[in-house]
Image: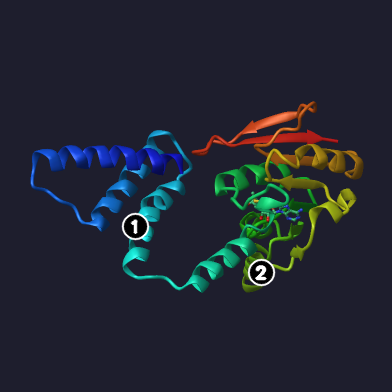
């Protein structure tokens, strides 16, 4: 949002100069389109995550469009409801939905593929990684636990469509899952739940098992190993061996 604000100021200053010295007058769609372009350039310059690019570009244009074509209030309500069932855990758990990339899943596969017979992804999102592992290791029993309705349905459907019987997607809360059953547990959450989650994995997981956290550390508990993934976001996998 800060990028949009700065982009608005830069673009307005530029237009003020242009209109001062020429007859050029831009209509509102071009004014807002310009703000979007400047905002996404700012996003690129400050290395925001890639998905911010289209958001920063399209947001001002969507605003302009809504001025020309008034949108009924229920559309906003419907959009809000859809966002809530996708980003269910963003407010309560402070864990939004973002996805582990394929390179990282490939690295996780090299770490657990040989030894783990039972693998769990706590908060499995749309299930991409589980499908990746499930296809590579038909003998591995893979469980995804997800409490946000839309990601759960998407992951469940993906598993059904591919007919992978070694993958089980459960709708539920990871805090109530007994982790004693798993050889390897993976989580890509946020800094917020890490301390509580570490207490849980430490007290429930058996000796000889592995816990992997994508990116998020646990204060006061150094991992046994850190694996650096060669991807664009320079992912770090923090690994604890119990
Ligand atoms: C950052 S996403 C990671 C998705 C997937 N694991 C991946 O790496 O691609 C975190 C997911 O955890 C889910 N989540 C957060 N808290 C949860 C909880 N208490 N129980 C189950 N799922 C939870 C969120 O809904 C979200 O889909």
For the point 38% across and 34% down, the residue is 45
Q: Circle 2 sits on which residue?
A: 153
The foreground one among 69 and 159 is 69
Q: Determine which quarter of the picture holds residue 3.
A: top left
Report whether 55 appears left or right of 119. Answer: left
The reply to whether the C-beta atoms of the residues labelled 1 and 2 are less than 8 Å apart is no
Under tag 2, what secondary structure?
helix
The foreground one among 168 and 220 is 220
Q: Circle 1 sits on which residue?
A: 61
x, y percentage for residue 108?
66, 44
Instruction: Establish if 172 lies above or below 199.
Output: below
Q: Determine which quarter of the picture holds residue 150.
A: bottom right
Q: Specify whether tag 2 is near ligand 1 (CB below 8 Å).
A: no
x, y percentage for residue 39?
36, 43
Q: Earlier in the sequence, mark 1 or mark 2?
A: 1
Instruction: Establish if 23 lies above or below 64.
Output: above
For the point 84% across and 50% down, the residue is 182
Distance from label 1 to label 2 (Cα)?
31 Å
The foreground one among 111 and 44 is 44
Instruction: Establish if 135 lies above or below 111.
Output: below
Total number of numbered discs in the rendering: 2
Q: Quadrant of the C terminus?
A: top right
Report whether 56 appears left or right of 86. Answer: left
Within 10 angstroms of label 1, few (less than 14), some, or many (20 or more) residues? many
For the point 77% across and 47% down, the residue is 185
Q: Determine which quarter of the picture holds residue 240.
A: top right
x, y percentage for residue 128?
61, 57
């Amino acid at each position: 949002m800060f990028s949009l604000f700065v982009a608005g100021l830069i673009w307005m200053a530029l237009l003020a100069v242009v209109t001062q010295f020429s007859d050029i007058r831009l209509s509102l769609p071009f004014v807002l389109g310009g703000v979007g372009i400047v905002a996404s350039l700012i996003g690129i310059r400050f290395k925001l995550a890639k998905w911010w690019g289209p958001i920063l570009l399209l947001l001002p244009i969507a605003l302009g469009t809504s001025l020309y074509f008034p949108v009924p209030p229920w559309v906003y309500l419907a959009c809000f409801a859809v966002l809530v069932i996708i980003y269910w855990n963003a407010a309560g758990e402070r864990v939004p939905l973002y996805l582990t990339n394929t390179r990282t899943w490939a690295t996780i596969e090299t770490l657990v593929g040989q030894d783990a017979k039972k693998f769990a992804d706590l908060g499995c999102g749309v299930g991409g990684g589980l499908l990746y592992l499930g296809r590579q290791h038909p003998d591995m029993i893979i469980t995804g636990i997800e409490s946000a309705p839309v990601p759960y349905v998407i992951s469940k459907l993906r598993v059904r469509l591919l007919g992978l019987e070694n993958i089980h997607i459960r709708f539920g809360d990871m805090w109530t899952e007994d982790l004693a059953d798993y050889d390897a547990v993976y989580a890509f959450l946020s800094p917020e739940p890490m301390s509580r989650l570490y207490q849980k994995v430490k007290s429930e997981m058996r000796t000889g098992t592995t816990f992997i956290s994508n990116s998020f550390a646990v204060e006061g508990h150094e991992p046994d190993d850190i694996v650096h993934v060669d991807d664009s976001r320079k992912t770090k996998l923090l690994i604890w061996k119990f």
